[in-house]
């Protein structure tokens, strides 16, 4: 009887249930797992039948985990994580970075850093198949810890000891202002010059938003603060004359369509005003040595204008 029960227990079904618990939604869980919603729902019901317990309370408005589900899903996460670790151990014994590598990149870095990196990465690692995922810092860190990503390009330091990282390079910030701004004619600005009204910010969830607030001496956005969903939108808001902001160096490259509308100015003590970009992975990942080698390659390919990480 015990053997029959184990034979009916599928790792994939456990992964489906964990995805539903993570996302609180069958449709989004199906999208993450690459299956139809109907198929995922049916497999979760079969799993509940096999376990003899309802994992989820389903209503027309929301999905909640049942008390029994809390206990069982905690164990399911451990089983899925152990299975992933088994696969990673097997893969690391041959060619650690051959095959798919799910690499997350924070949205304020990816569009400006990756174009200059991908050709060299494909030449150095011809058997590596990059699977890129862009997003906000918190969601990408969660995906990395959950095993949905293998590594992550992110601003350091990391908020959890469950992950480890290698610093790659220091990217300075620049002040970006409308051409008509009173400060636009100054060759160099101090952070104190940016402490007044008019600071434009990214929406909540971007680590760059918090860095900009802190550097400009603000704990919270002002009552009349304006927000952008991306750095490109932030650039366009500056060009429209709505205000100024701090942008990472790689995002300040001139765009022909914005010529004459924005001014990019260096900051006093620029060597201290910026962010350290690193490559992060799970501490338990057996490919740590391969990731350190990959980080060394990324340091070799550090973009122009950046400097060695402190």
Image (tube, rainbow, N blue to C red):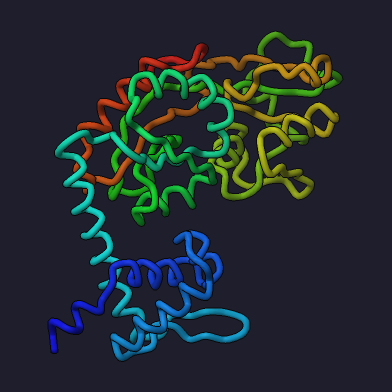
- Locate the C terminus by quadrant: top left
Q: Nearer the viewer, residue 243 or 294?
A: 294
Asked whether, in this view, residue 208 is left or right of residue 73, the answer is: right
- Which residue is located at x 68 percent, y 39 percent? 201
Q: Nearer the viewer, residue 263 or 154?
A: 154
Asked whether, in this view, residue 219 is left or right of residue 176, the answer is: left
Identify the image quadrant of residue 100: top left
- Which residue is located at x 80 percent, y 21 percent? 258
- Which residue is located at x 65 percent, y 18 percent? 253
Report x, y in % for residue 235. Answer: 73, 30
- Count of marks overlaid on the render: 0
Asked whether, in this view, residue 206 is left or right of residue 163, the answer is: right
Asked whether, in this view, residue 283 is left or right of residue 212, the answer is: left
Residue 310 visible here = no
Report x, y in % for residue 192. Answer: 65, 25
Q: Say above or below: 261 vs 58.
A: above
Identify the image quadrant of residue 199: top right
- Which residue is located at x 49 percent, y 22 percent? 171
Residue 10 visible here = yes
- Locate the N terminus by quadrant: bottom left
Report x, y in % for residue 127. Answer: 32, 30
Report x, y in % for residue 4. Answer: 17, 84
């Amino acid at each position: 009887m015990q053997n029959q029960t184990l034979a009916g227990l599928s790792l994939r079904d456990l992964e489906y249930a964990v995805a539903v618990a993570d996302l609180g939604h069958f449709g989004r869980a199906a999208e993450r797992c690459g299956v139809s919603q109907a198929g995922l729902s049916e497999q979760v019901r079969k799993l509940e039948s096999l376990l003899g317990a309802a994992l989820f309370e389903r209503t027309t408005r929301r999905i909640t985990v049942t008390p029994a589900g809390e206990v069982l899903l905690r164990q399911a996460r451990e089983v899925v994580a152990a299975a992933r670790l088994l696969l990673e151990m097997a893969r690391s014994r041959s060619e650690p970075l051959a095959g798919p590598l799910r690499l997350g990149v924070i949205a304020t870095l990816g569009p400006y850093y990756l174009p200059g990196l991908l050709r060299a990465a494909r030449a150095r690692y011809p058997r590596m198949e990059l699977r890129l995922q862009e997003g906000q810092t918190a969601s990408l860190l969660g995906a990395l810890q959950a095993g949905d990503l293998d590594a992550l390009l992110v601003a350091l330091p990391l908020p959890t000891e469950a992950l480890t990282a290698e610093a790659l390079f220091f990217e300075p910030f620049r002040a970006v202002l409308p051409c008509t701004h009173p400060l636009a004619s100054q060759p160099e600005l101090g952070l104190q010059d940016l402490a007044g009204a008019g600071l434009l910010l990214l929406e909540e969830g971007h680590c760059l938003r918090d860095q900009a607030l802190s550097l400009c001496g603000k704990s919270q956005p002002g009552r009349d603060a304006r927000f952008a969903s991306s750095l490109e939108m932030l650039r366009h808001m500056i060009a429209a004359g709505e205000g100024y902001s701090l942008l990472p160096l790689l995002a300040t490259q001139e765009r022909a369509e914005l010529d004459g509308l924005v001014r990019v100015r260096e900051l006093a003590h620029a060597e201290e005003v910026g962010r350290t970009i690193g490559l992060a992975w799970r501490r338990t990942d057996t490919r740590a040595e391969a990731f350190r080698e990959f980080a060394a390659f990324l340091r070799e390919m550090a973009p122009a204008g950046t400097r060695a990480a402190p």
